[in-house]
């Protein structure tokens, strides 16, 4: 391969050689994927905060330790992944944990993400 041609190619993480058009396409795909991840994170946090306030009366302790005692929570989980609620159980648990843990400490109230919450959500988002 000539030196001139080598400058136009990029070896990607997948071991594939990308030309200029493919690099532009990859950059756009990565930008859109990041945008999608941001929307998913915001939706997950917003939903968890709503559940914490509406279902658990903004009681982080009840949301973390006494979920099984709450009839609305039990009904949500019973429906999760089925025809009446096409969202599996994991997002419920993740969202409530994020909301409860970020609201439990006054210094963290309004914080967007804790490192543990980001890690948990990342694992959820990357499950296959």
Image (cartoon, grey):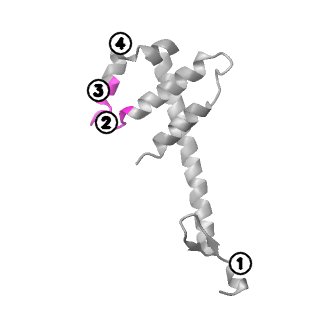
Name the front one of labels 2 and 4. 4
Tell me the chief SS of the magenta region: loop
| Label 2 close to label 4 by CB (< 8 Å) | no
Against 107, residue 46 (above or below) is below
| Crowd tier of the residue under label 1, counting other residues whose Cα lies within 10 Å: few below 14, some 14–19, many 20 or above | few
The residue stretch that appears in magenta: 76-89
Q: Earlier in the sequence, mark 2 or mark 1?
A: 1
Q: CA distance from mark 2 to mark 1?
A: 49 Å
Q: Earlier in the sequence, mark 4 or mark 1?
A: 1
The residue at which mark 1 appears reads as 7
Query: Mark 4 — residue?
Result: 69
Secondary element at tag 4: helix
Q: Residue at x 44, y 15 (%)?
A: 65
| Disc 4 to disc 3, C-alpha distance | 14 Å
Number of residues whose C-alpha sits closer than 10 Å to that of mark 4, classed few (under 14), some (14–19) or many (20 or more): few
Nearer-the-camera pick, 85 or 120: 120
Name the residue that disc number 2 marks.
Answer: 81
Pick whichever, 79 or 98, lies toward us.
98
């Amino acid at each position: 391969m000539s030196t001139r041609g080598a400058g136009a190619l990029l070896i990607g993480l997948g071991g594939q050689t990308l030309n200029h058009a493919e690099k532009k396409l990859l950059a756009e795909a990565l930008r859109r994927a990041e945008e999608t991840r941001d929307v998913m994170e915001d939706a997950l946090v917003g939903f968890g905060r709503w559940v914490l306030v509406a279902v658990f009366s903004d009681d982080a302790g009840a949301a973390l330790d006494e979920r099984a005692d709450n009839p609305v929570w039990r009904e949500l989980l019973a429906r999760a992944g089925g025809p009446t609620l096409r969202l599996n159980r994991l997002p419920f648990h993740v969202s409530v944990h994020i909301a409860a843990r970020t609201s439990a400490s006054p210094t963290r109230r309004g914080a967007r993400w804790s490192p543990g919450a980001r890690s948990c959500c990342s694992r959820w988002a990357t499950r296959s």
